[in-house]
Image (cartoon, grey):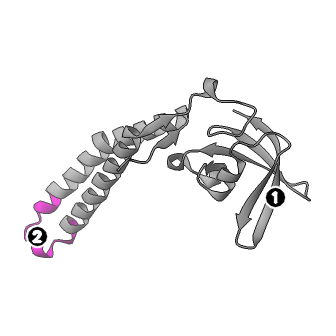
Amino acid sequence: MVDKEFFFTEEGLKKTEDELEHLKSVVRREVAEKIKIALGYGDLSENAEYDHAKNEQAKVEEKIAKLENMLRNAVLIEEEKVDKTLVNIGSVVKVKEVGTDDEEEYTIVGSAETDPLEGKISNESPMGSALLGKKVGDIAEVEVPDGTVSFEIVSITM
């Protein structure tokens, strides 16, 4: 089975590497200390602090494994090799819904970097996949629960 590739901008890759390093060097130690303290409370069968710390440890280890897998299968989007006339991963795209004057701006990123509050949408999302490969002036059709919404590509930058 082939592992899924995770597309990253340079910024997103650095952020993920930093998060992994923080989890391994700081958070792991903090959780280990919580477990050590909880062990000092005695009987583990009724030790809520120990149970909580072990659950936290499992979540941290799961997150570390997930990030390591993402980084192992990371594909860096090299800005200088990207066709800047087409929407690609790493592109900043300004769009306008057809029939309105409302413009919105999105950065197309890999699924690992998605952050809708910052306008970062996944290349795998309905909007992201509809925009990929389009040029300025093209119309992207996006399927939404109420039907199809059309967006005109206003500008593409990196």
Task: Give how far across and how far down residue 73 sits, in percent.
Answer: 40, 40
Residue pictured at 20% horizontal, 51% vertical: 32
Q: Nearer the viewer, residue 126 or 51?
A: 126
Residue that label 2 marks: 44
CA distance separating discs 2 and 1: 59 Å
Residue pictured at 76% horizontal, 32% vertical: 85
Residue furthest to the front: 1
38 magenta-colored: yes
In the picture, which quadrant includes the C terminus? top right
Query: Three-letter amino acid code at disc 1?
Result: Ser
**Element under label 1?**
strand
Q: Nearer the viewer, residue 142 or 16?
A: 142
121 magenta-colored: no
Residue that label 1 marks: 150
Query: Three-letter amino acid code at disc 2?
Result: Leu
Task: Give how far across and how far down residue 18 sits, in percent.
Answer: 41, 37
Residue furthest to the left: 43
Say if 44 sits above or below 33 in the image.
below
Q: Which residues are magenta?
A: 37-49
Q: Which mark is residue 116?
A: none
